[in-house]
Image: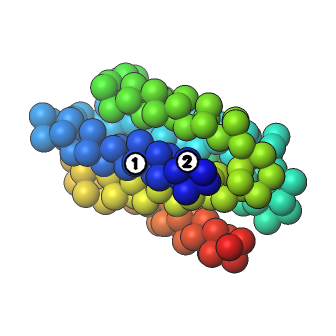
Amino acid sequence: MLKKFAIIGSASLLTLSGAVLAHGSNGINDAQIAHVAYTAGVIDVSAAKQALEKSKNRAVREFAEQMVRDHEAVNNQALALVQKLGVKPEDNGTSQELSRQAATEHATLARLDGAAFDQAYLRNEIAYHRSVNMALKDTLIPSTHNGELKALLQTGLTLFTEHQAHAEQLAASAR
């Protein structure tokens, strides 16, 4: 059953890069990119808060605390940047699809407890960070025109790659 949930979560969140790539080929702009990046951060904060409510595992809770801290910090930087630039982040199909997928995953994780929750949460974090990192690297960063936004996204990519590796390490040690 746990593998089924992990596969469902991984499959649904891996569509992020496909959605971004499809949108990117139609000319995603900086305001839309900012919204996608911000939405991705908000989603991971929400998932981490769910883990903090449900998990009793110290390592999982510490990881979730780091996700809240890091993603909120990057999102605060993004908000400050768009305010400085006078840009209003623009909602778009990719952001909406991310939110829809996250709600589905949240409901899936809500039905789990204990070690089953911890493993599913970590597997989702791995898949989610892998997908976001691929979208950042392959589409969002190359499509960004503003140098400051591009630099913030590159910083985010470095940090979120570390998150993915950390989640992979935790999942492997919990087996």
Question: What's under tag 2, amino acid-wise?
Answer: Phe
In this view, the residue farthest toward the front is: 1
The residue drawn where x is 80% and y is 52% is 114
> Residue 69 appears at what percent x and percent y?
70, 50
> Residue 54 appears at what percent x and percent y?
81, 43
What residue is disc 2 on? Answer: 5
Q: How is the model colour-coded?
A: rainbow
What residue is disc 1 on? Answer: 11
Q: Please state which of residues 101 and 144 is positioned toward the viewer in this rendering.
A: 101
- The residue mark sitting in front, 1 or 2, is 2
In the rendered view, does 75 fall on the left or right side of 142?
A: right
In the rendered view, does 14 fall on the left or right side of 75?
A: left
> Residue 148 appears at what percent x and percent y?
38, 49
In the rendered view, does 10 fall on the left or right side of 111?
A: left
Mark 1 crowd level (few <14, some 14–19, many ≥20, 10 Å Cα): some
Secondary structure beneath label 2: helix
The residue drawn where x is 52% and y is 31% is 104
Question: Does residue 9 appear in this view?
Answer: yes
Question: Does residue 82 appear in this view?
Answer: no
The residue drawn where x is 46% and y is 33% is 101
